[in-house]
Structure formats: structure tokens, C-alpha cells
Image (tube, rainbow, N blue to C red):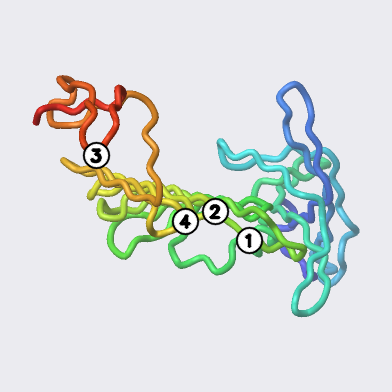
Amino acid sequence: MSGFRFIDWVVQLVDVIGSTLDGPHNAVLMGGNTVVGSLDPTEPDDEAPNDATDEAPAYGAPGIVFRPRPPEEVETDAGTELLSAEAVAARVADTLIPVAWRDLRLNRRFVAPKAGTVALVGYGGGFLSFDDGSTEGTLQTLYCPYDFDADGVAQKTHAILVQPDGANGISINHGDGYQLSLTSGGFLLRCSDANTFLQVKEGQIVMSAAKIFAKGTLYVGQAGELGVPLLPGPASPPCPSLFLSPS
């Protein structure tokens, strides 16, 4: 960047090249450098030398602790590019204090967010996002990819979705196909196949599986607590752990 700008006296763009933890509170300190425009209004085309800062305290939003990855090479359509965290820093005495951030590696992990989306994204591809609903409300997603291949592409994903309506409700999804859903229609626990599930709703419980094992004493009937042991009959042996109520 060239040409004199008064803002260059107080604010700079910084490439963050490293970070450390310091002190009893594990404060994050940043190291970086920048090329600034001319600081001499009489020579607007001159460029000042690199301003470097080491162990500068990093400030950001309350509750967000952020320590960037070191710079790394990434493959793009144009070839290999070196990416690092970048900061807008305020000039304070003889140092620079980063106050606002971006890291395009995080943008690469969270591709094409919709208008209105707010997200907290991690370097490993996981994110917590808040998306505009079709009406009032926000779709909230906690996304955790895993089982990465040699190209760094996740083969499986865990996810928790909270949707802004009762019909879809809350779902917890395992990368191997297991799902727990809480909706206005009840509770559903299902496996990766369509024929194994447990559904609970008002006045009804439905179980489906190729095999169902009930281990322990089992009481069956409208008044199960009054049941008596199953006695031998023409087609069945006795079963002292199965109690049948008279109704």
C-alpha cells in the first residue's frame, strides 16, 4: 500500500507470524509485522520500513479466546499461497496492539455462508453457526467433522441441530447414522437402518428391531404391578420372570 493516509499514524494492518502464552493468566501475545504507507505527507509515495512487534497483547471480544495457527501454505486455483492470521492493530508508543482479526483459513473451512449467518469456526472445520430461518427464528448448528482422508476431507460428521419450530425441534446426529430427535410429536431414537428405532409419544411407545432382548423381571399388562408369574401351558414352559396382569 502506498500514498500518505493520516490513519496510518494510528492504525495498521499486521500479518501475524507467531503467538505465545504469557503470565499466570495465559494471556495470548502476538508477533507480527507490516509494511506501512508513507508517514511523511511531503513524500506520499514513499513507504516506511516494516514495523514489527513481538509479544503484543491481543484484544478481542469478551469470552472469545483466540490463538491462531502459525502461517501455512495452502493450495488454491492460482497455486500455493501462504496464509496467516491478519489483524488491524493500533499504534501504541513503540508497539502495535491487535484489536480486530481475520484468518482466511477459517473462511476456507466455512464455505459460502448464507446472508444473515453468524458462525464461530475452528481450524479443524468444526463450527457453531446461527442461520436465519425462513421466518422469524434462528437455526443453530453445532458441527463436528472427523475421520479425515488423505486430502483432509471429513468422511463423517457429528451434528446437533436446534430448529426454530416445534415440528423439527432438536436432533443429535452421530456420524455412523444414529440419531436422537426431540420434536412436538415426541421422542425418536433410531439407528442407521430404517427398521431399528424407539419412538415415544403421548400414550404410546413403539419399538422395532430384528431382535428385542428384555433382561430381568418383566411385568406386562394394564395392572402390571399385580401380575403373577406365567404358568406352564400347552404351548409354553413356565417363566418365573414374566408376570402377567389379569387385564
Nearer mark to the viewer, of 4 and 1: 4
Q: Earlier in the sequence, mark 2 or mark 3?
A: 2
Query: Which amino acid, by three-letter code, is at mark 4?
Result: Ser
Mark 3 / mark 1, whichever is N-terminal: 1
Which quadrant holds residue 237? top left
**Residue at which label 1 appears:** 155
Q: Is residue 192 left or right of residue 36?
A: left
Residue at 26% x, 43% y is 200
Residue corresponding to mark 2: 176
| Residue linked to disc 4 | 192
What residue is drawn where x is 26% and y is 55%? 167
Distance, label 4 to label 1, CA atoms, is 16 Å
Depth check: 11 or 152 in front? 152
What residue type is disc 3 on?
A: Ala
Q: Position of residue 210 (x, y in %)?
A: 40, 51
> Could you tell me which residue is drawn at 43 percent across and 50 percent down?
179
What is the quadrant of residue 149 in the picture?
bottom right
Q: Which residue is mark 3?
A: 235
Determine whether label 3 and label 1 are within 8 Å by CB. no
N-term-proximal mark, 4 vs 2:
2
Please tell me how crowded label 4 is: few (under 14), some (14-19), or many (20+) other residues with Cα within 10 Å.
Answer: few
Mark closer to the observer (3, 4): 3
Is residue 6 something that shows in the picture? no
Closer-to-camera residue (206/156): 206
